[in-house]
Amino acid sequence: MPVKAGERLDPEATRDRILRAAADVFGRRGIHAAGINEIVEAAGASKLTIYRNFGSKDGLIEAVLTDRAQRVRAWHHEAVAGADGGGRAQVLAVFDLIATWYAEAGFRGCALMNAATEDRGYDGAPRRLAQDHLTFYRDLFRRLLSGARDPERTARQLVVVLEGATLVSAMDRDPGVGAEARVIVEMLLDAAF
Amino acid sequence: MPVKAGERLDPEATRDRILRAAADVFGRRGIHAAGINEIVEAAGASKLTIYRNFGSKDGLIEAVLTDRAQRVRAWHHEAVAGADGGGRAQVLAVFDLIATWYAEAGFRGCALMNAATEDRGYDGAPRRLAQDHLTFYRDLFRRLLSGARDPERTARQLVVVLEGATLVSAMDRDPGVGAEARVIVEMLLDAAF
DNA sequence: AAGTGATAGTACCGATCGTTCTTATCTGGG
DNA sequence: CCCAGATAAGAACGATCGGTACTATCACTT
């Protein structure tokens, strides 16, 4: 919902509104394909406000991706904290969470991997944030697998399965890939402990 | 090497030269980011020749991706044909092939998935070709697993591992992911037969 | 009541992009 | 010998894009 000119809102709320609209437009259309004007329209914000808050399109992209990464991490930490039954159950909780993610309307894969893929050949913020995201998953899994035989190796394998399932699910528009991934994960966990 | 104006070469050779140069530029820089002028320069061809052969940038993209898909399929068919020892060995031959692919200089992931990711939100040729490519892998694995307990399910799992490994290897610039994927594949094959 | 700051809306600018057009050059065939 | 075809080189065009500038409006503060 647009804000009327001059309406005094928390500037933080304006920033968040732009961030959410930009994430939506970038996700639906692709980062390069989406123009600033589309985000202006979607956010009901003026260009001036966007550029005053984020400096440039690249700054907006980085802010969107950073925000996205933080949200995803918070979700996973919550899912892990809510799972009882040890490391095995916690890893499965992570994959259950991403399985429900695949089923969401408008699911288009991981925003961070998508952005880095669009930016290939350019070592900028998207690529760095995408690598950080892979590292986050690897660290998370390694921590959950502290009792396993080879936590590092199993963690890396889980990251491969997670990213592969996300890509295939997005490309085929098939949420069922989440269930297939879970079977692989159970197998990896059986072998890991 | 540029062709001098008027030099009479096989028009097929000119087309192939443009195709190779475009594949290289698209792969290094990204499809959206790469301009026609960069391909002109890389191919040593004129714009006129490119547009007469491919009609438009989209036509060139489609031709590049189609060519790429055919080459990849031929490589895999060759690898499968050269592997003796039944379905299990043939599946492993496919993953050995992609492991060597990860180690190639300038490896940037699967051109088809990358292109479809750039084009998300637009159901054009790149997306269709990427889906076809996933189907190719699934069909290939299912055929190789005809003696297994559940060929369809295992084939789908193998596709997830293959795409996940490709993405992670490209993102981390780590060819070692191929070896990690192979361990998962061996595990899946152990369970499948 | 006046002033300040954030905002929407919109016009505008320079650059780049995809595409077309023009010109000159060279080769092979009639 | 000349013509047809393919090509390189590059100018030109319209559209779009990221980014800036300007104006008017409204809320809050003093």
Image (cartoon, coloured by chain):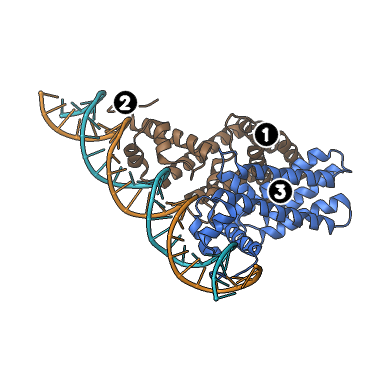
Chain colours: A brown, B blue, C orange, D cyan
Type of the residue with mark 1: Asp
The tally of labels here is 3
Q: Which mark is residue A174?
A: 1
Judge whether B41 appears above or below A129 on screen.
below
Mark 1 — on which chain does it sit? A
Question: Within the image, what quadrant is residue D23 found in?
Answer: top left
* Residue for badge 2: A4
Q: Position of residue A39 (x, y in %)?
A: 42, 36
Q: Could you give the CA–CA distance between mark 1 and mark 2, rounded to whole angstroms?
A: 41 Å
B117 or A96, nearer to the observer: B117
Residue at 33% in and 32% down: A11
Q: Which mark is residue B162?
A: 3
Type of the residue with mark 3: Leu
Q: Position of residue B126 (x, y in %)?
A: 61, 45
**Pointer 3 and pointer 1 on the same chain:** no
Local SS, label 2: loop
Question: Within the image, what quadrant is residue A136 found in?
Answer: top right
Q: Position of residue A141 (x, y in %)?
A: 64, 43
Local SS, label 3: helix
> Along the horizontal axis of the image, is C30 left or right of C1?
right
Residue at 51% in and 50% down: B32
Type of the residue with mark 2: Lys
Local SS, label 1: loop
Q: Could you give the CA–CA distance between mark 3 and mark 1, rounded to whole angstroms?
A: 17 Å
Q: Could you give the CA–CA distance between mark 3 and mark 2, rounded to whole angstroms?
A: 51 Å
Tag 3–tag 1 contact (CB < 8 Å) = no
> Along the horizontal axis of the image, is A42 left or right of A114?
left
Question: Within the image, what quadrant is residue C28 found in?
Answer: bottom right
